Amino acid sequence: MNELPSKAYIVAVDMGYGHMRAAYPLLDISATPLSWNIREPYIISANTYPGIPKKDQKLWQSGRGIYEWISRMRELPFLGERLFAAMNYFQRIDHFYPKRDQSKTMFQLDYIYKLIHKKGFGKHLIHELNKNPLPLITTFFTPAFCAEEHGYKGPIYCLCTDTDISRAWVPQHPKNSRIIYFAPSHRVCERLKAYGVPEEKIITTGFPLPKELVGKSMKDLDLIKSVTHRRIIRLDPTGKFRKKFQTLVSETLGRDIHGSTSEPVSIAFAIGGANAQFQIGLDVIESLAPDIKNGKFRLNLIAGVSNKIYGIFEKALKDHGLDLYRGKGVDIIYNPDKVTYFAEFDEVLLDTDILWTKPSELAFYAGLGLPILIAPTLGSQEEYNQDWLHVVGAGIGQGNPRYTREWLSDWLESGILSEMALNGYLNVSKKGAYHIEAAVLRGEHSEMQDIHLV
C-alpha cells in the first residue's frame, strides 16, 4: 500500500493577484525541492522560481507585460479600447448555450504547445520537481500542460480560478490527458465537459477561501457564522431586512439578530493587480471623507503590492484631511511581498462589511458572507464572474463613485446589503481549500454541495 503524501507542490504564476491568491489558502500543505533551500511554506511561481532559465523568464515576462500595459491603456479613447478588445478576443469565453461540443482547439492553446514542444518551455521546472515527484497543484493552465508534456511523474491537478473558463484551460487533446481539474463552480464543471475533459477527471470543489476566514476544519464554521452575524447587523441599521427574514437568519447563523450597533460600516476597496482602476478609489475617498470623519464609515484602501498606488492613495488622504484618521477611520493596506499582503488583506476582511472590487477571483469571497460592490469588468472572464454574482444574489454594480456617500447610505437603509451578505453565505461554497486538500492528500473526492447550478 502506497503511503499517502502529506505535502504537494503549489504552483502559480505571478501575474496580477488571481492565480497567486487562489494558491495562498493551500500554503500550509506546500513543498519545495530540497535543492532550493527554501524555508517552507512557499508558493512556487512558474515565472519567477529560483534558477528559472532566462529564455523561460522572457517568455513569461512578454505575456505579463503586454496584458498589464493594455489593461492600463484601456482608459484611453479609441486606441486603448481597441487594443483591449483585441486582447480580450483571444481569451474570450464563448456562450454556454446552446449546449454543444466545444473541444476544438484554439490559437492561444496551439501557441503554448508550440513553445513547450519546440522551445522546451517549462521543462526546467518540471525536471526540478521530478527529483521528488509529489502531487502538483497549479492555479494556471500552462504549468499543467508543461508538467504533462515534459513527463512529470506525480499526479497533476489544475485549479480553475474563475466562475467560467475559456478553452485555453484545457489541453489540445483532453480525452487523453491525465490532468485532474478542480472546478470552483458547477458552470466550470459543465464547461470542462464541453471542452472534452472526461467527467472522472473533474472534481467540483469550490474556490479555496483562506482557512483563517472560514474555520479550523471542514465542519467548523463558527468563525464565519460569527463574522457574518456582526456584518448583517451593521449593514441593516433600520432593521428592515432582519424583520423580514429573522427566522431564516437566526436558524442559518445560530444567533439572535436583534439589536443595533454604533460601529461604523467598514468598506474595503481592492484595486486589481494591473492598477487600472485607482481613480475609483480617489472618487470614493472624496465622497466618503465627511462620513469617515464623523464615524459612519471606515475605509480600507487595498493598494496590494503597488508602492505607486500606495503613494497615490496617501496623497489623496492628505488632500481631504484624512491623514489624521489613519488607523481609526481609514487605512491603506500595502506590502511589497505578495504572500504577506494576502495575509494582511485577510485580516482586514475579518472586520469588513462590504468588499468593493472588480469581479475577479474575489467574486468567490462572497461565500464569506461579504456583499460585493462590483467595479467595472476587465475581460471576458470578469463579465461571467459579474453575471454569477448577480445569479447568486451576492453582488451589485457600483453606483457613481463620486456620489458614493448618497447611494450607499440609501442601500444601507433599505437592507439590501444585508440580504446580499446572507445570499453569499448561503449560496457560495466556503470549503474549497478543504475539499482540495482531501482530494490530493487523502484521495477523498468529496464535492461542494450548494443550490446553484452556476
Image (tube, rainbow, N blue to C red):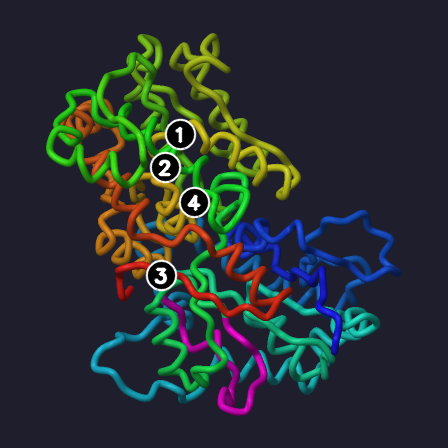
Residue type beneath disc 4:
Ala
Determine which of the numbered discs, if any, sits on residue 265 in the image: none
Residue topped by disc 4:
276
Residue type beneath disc 1:
Thr
Residue topped by disc 1:
352
Please state the extent of the stretch shown in magenta in the rendering.
163-181
Q: Identify the residue at horizontal 21%, vertical 82% (top origin).
A: 98
Q: Earlier in the sequence, mark 4 or mark 2?
A: 4
Residue topped by disc 2:
355
Under circle 4, the secondary element is loop
Q: Is residue 254 left or right of residue 447?
A: left
Residue type beneath disc 2:
Leu
x and y, in percent, of residue 246 in the image: 17, 32
Q: Earlier in the sequence, mark 3 or mark 4?
A: 4
Location of residue 19 with respect to 335 vertically, above or below: below
x and y, in percent, of residue 291 in the image: 29, 14
Q: Residues within 10 Å of mark 2 (few under 14, many from 20)?
A: many
Give the mark toward the camera: 3 or 4: 3
x and y, in percent, of residue 367 in the image: 37, 47
Residues tagged 1 and 2 counted as in contact (Cβ below 8 A): yes
Q: Earlier in the sequence, mark 1 or mark 4?
A: 4
Residue topped by disc 3:
449
Residues tagged 3 and 1 counted as in contact (Cβ below 8 A): no
Q: Is residue 351 a member of the stretch shown in magenta?
A: no
